[in-house]
Image (spheres, rainbow, N blue to C red):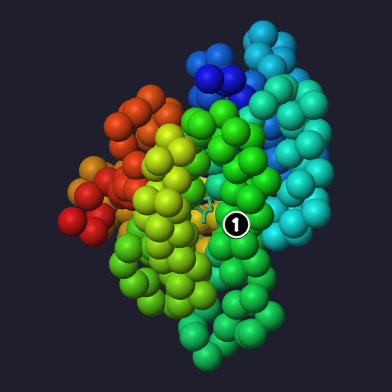
Amino acid sequence: MEKNAVITGSSRGIGKAIARAFSENGWGVCINYIERRDLAEELCAQLRASGGRAVAIKADVADKQQVEEMFRKAQAELGDISLLVNNAGISCHKQFQDTEPEMWKRIFDVNVFGCVNCINAALPYMLHAHEGIIINISSIWGLHGGSCESAYTASKHAVVGLTRSLSAELAPSHIRVNSIAPGVIETDMMKNELSEEELEELKKEMPLERFGSPEDVAKAALYIAEAEYMTGQAIVLEGGYLI
Ligand code: NAP
């Protein structure tokens, strides 16, 4: 298998940790971003300085044309793409009545159609090669219901459903599709949503007595890449929060 990966939303947070982990394990990585070119270029330079193969490419995953262009550039720079991590995502912490239709649309455009666009762009090579790995980053709110998270929760349930359905459809082509459902992971997303006091209270509810780190999620992504007999699963990483 060609060891080249596109990891969406990898300029910071969970995606950055996944890009670093795959690079350290010999994969060429496409670092994708929408605004933070500085962070994406910085990570790219660090990975290259450590002997890795990396390229940073801007694309809004919600935009089909930009995604297709990203895959063309990534393939030209790195080679054929055999692994896709659909990580780019946005959240919305609001009561249902306060969530405007535009926000519902943008959440679904990024969190769901972002996956659809990237999978469509990745599939021609994977089908031709008769192998491939797709990892969709969902959330515990893709498996449970969270108050003040209706748009986000609905979009992350869609990601789990997409994963299950596609895994069945693509298994005969030896393309594995799995998802990861993280709990509270220490990134900008979580810090933007909750105040410091709310985070302190939440931490007390964590049986493992800490929030997850982006590196915890990266380890699960590496495991999925290696677990050749696993498809259609949602790996839950939430420190025991919702057992
Ligand atoms: P984050 O810190 O907010 O980082 C988001 C990343 O996605 C950034 O690299 C950002 O790029 C990129 N991005 C956002 N919109 C994009 C778009 N339209 N096109 C391309 N890239 C885009 O988020 P995170 O916490 O690492 O979350 C990553 C994933 O994990 C998301 O799918 C999220 O729903 C999921 N998740 C997170 C948590 C958590 O507690 N943190 C828990 C469960 C699931 P720029 O830097 O250019 O803005």
Closer-to-camera residue (77/212): 77
User: Does residue 33 sit above or below 16 in this rendering?
Assistant: below
In front: 60, or 197? Answer: 60
Across and down, in percent, residue 138 comes to 45, 55
Is residue 215 rendered to the left or right of residue 42? Answer: left
Q: Determine which residue is flagged by label 1.
A: 116
- 108 or 127: nearer the viewer: 127
- Horizontal and vertical percent for residue 187? 53, 47
**Residue type, numbered disc 1:** Val
Residue 78 percent across, percent down from the top left: 72, 22
Q: Secondary structure at mark 1?
A: helix
Residue 29: in sight, yes or no? no
Determine the image quadrant of residue 212: top left
Percent across and percent down for residue 226 are 38, 25
The quadrant in which residue 17 appears is top right
The 10 Å Cα crowd at callout 1, few under 14, some 14 to 19, many 20 or more, is some
In this picture, residue 66 sits left or right of residue 183 = right
Residue at 31% over, 67% down: 144
Residue ID at (32%, 47%): 233
Q: Is residue 167 above or below residue 25?
A: below
Q: Single out the residue that lies furthest toward the bottom.
A: 97
Would you say 59 lies left or right of 110 here?
right
Name, please, the residue furthest toward the top.
51
Q: With respect to residue 101, does 108 lie above or below?
A: above
Above/below status of 154 relative to 5 = below
What residue is shown at x 34% (from left), y 42% (from top)?
Answer: 231
